[in-house]
Image (tube, rainbow, N blue to C red):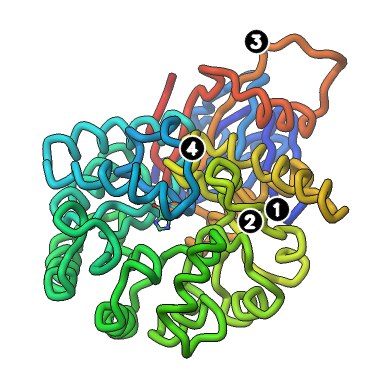
Amino acid sequence: MSITILKGDVVSAPALGQLDTTEQGYLVAEDGVIQGVFPALPERYAGAPVEDWGRALILQSLADLHLHAPQYPLMGTGMDLPLLEWLNAYAFPTEARYADPDYAREVYRLLSRDLAACGTTRVCMFSSLHTDATLILMEELEKAGITGFVGKVNMDRNSAPGLLQETTEESRRETLRWLEACQDFPHIKPILTPRFIPSCTDGLMTFLGKLAQERGLPAQSHLSENRAEMDWVRRLHPDCAQYWEAYAKYGLWNERTLMAHCVWSDQRERAAMRDSGVTMVHCPDSNLNLCSGFPQVQVMLREGVKVALGSDVAGGDRLSMFDAVAGAVRSSKARRMVDGADFLTVPEAWYLGTSAGAAYFGEAPGFAPGNALHAIVLSDDQLPQPHPLSLSERLERCVYRRQPGAIRAVWSAGRKIYEA
Ligand code: GUN
Ligand code: FE
């Protein structure tokens, strides 16, 4: 049996808005499975090697439940257009480059290493429509020790004909070829990924819904991100009173479904999410960059909707989920200035970026015994203290400051995958 014992100032998020803190505590895992956080090392581990990280923080690693891997090179550019124009001008031409496996290899290797270095160990990711590039992405994530889901994107209409669009038949055939080829990755699994309603024909959606049902596959897509997009969906599916129904009618609306953005979801759409156990993925940086809007995250949480966070690279301009956590707080404050709603606290946003994301993978919140070891060591001793800071104040400052080099080591599924 292998034993991992990390000693330091341990902080975890056992419930929305709550932090568990243990100064100079011991986080213990056996064979990569967490046994607990202890204020003193239990007798049974006497003599086992302890990695002592001094006064560094030991935190849960982060979960990015929505990003577009092929858009990584685009990140930080092209922020001058709203969603639908942005897709045509920037996202589609960038994604078209992944017909070239060498380019895919180069970008995906870099992205995978950068994810590990910024402490993101769980992902739900869009690839492009290219099967071979998607397999390369899965391979590179696997090599870097990242865990989670990757989807070959399906898009057979209204995209970029001749540049980035499949026929319905190609989309079906390539999806089956991809599912066949990706079976042996231990930590990276497939997720069905119709890009969004405007880019998938009814025939393709019917196929994907059947496939989800027959093979027990999860699905991810976009929902109610932008007003023009919603108008378009209404014209494409006049039988659906709301956007979400265009996923539900094909059987892609259940407790394994992830829906990014949900900026404009009203009470009825939110109730549909809650009742079916759909997870809403909040992408605050992207929503601001593309002028999409500010979703009512606190209302959703109060109503019982599952909410997690995403970077939405490259609508989002940062890969680090520390930015998404800070962005979620800022976004909620922007909303407060409009309608006086409660804003998210840092512990609440931290919960969304860690425990709420891990919940999609079936984990209990915080460093619960039985969870796989996903953790980061973060040192903040380069920064002078304004006064003696509590552990929760130190976490707050790390979220906002994002000091380069602060992340010292990262564990994913029990394995150390990064050390500075
Ligand atoms: N909706 C459909 N495709 C995309 C995409 O690539 N990014 C974002 N933010 N929204 C989308
Ligand atoms: Fe997106």
Marks 3, 1: nearer the viewer: 3
Queried on whether the Cβ of the residue with tag 3 lies below 8 angstroms from ligand 2, the answer reads: no
Specify whether 118 is left or right of 417: right
**Numbered-mark total:** 4
Gap in angstroms between the C-alphas marked 1 and 4: 39 Å
Q: Give coordinates of residue 288: x percent, y percent.
A: 60, 43
Callouts 2 and 1 close, C-beta under 8 Å: yes
User: Pointer 1: residues within 10 angstroms few (<14), some, or many (20+)?
Assistant: some
Q: Which residue is the site of mark 3?
A: 382
Q: Closer to the camera: disc 4 or disc 3?
A: 4
Q: What is the C-alpha distance between the residues marked 4 and 3?
A: 37 Å
Q: Looking at the image, in which quadrant does ligand 1 appear?
A: bottom left
**Residue drawn at (68%, 28%) of the image:** 400
Q: Which residue is mark 4?
A: 80
Q: Position of residue 219 (x, y in %)?
A: 39, 69
Residue that badge 2 annotates:
365
N-terminal of the pair, mark 2 or mark 3, is: 2
Question: Dot 4: what SS?
Answer: loop
Residue 141 placement (x, y as % from top left):
30, 43
Q: How far is the residue under mark 2 from the one under mark 1? A: 5 Å
The tag earlier along the polypeptide, 3 or 1, is 1
| 182 lies above or below 330 | below
- Tell me which label, 2 or 1, sits earlier in the chain: 1
Residue 137 sits above or below residue 242 on the image: above
Which numbered disc covers residue 14? 1
Reading the chain from its start, which is encountered first: label 4 or label 3? 4
Secondary structure type for disc 1: strand
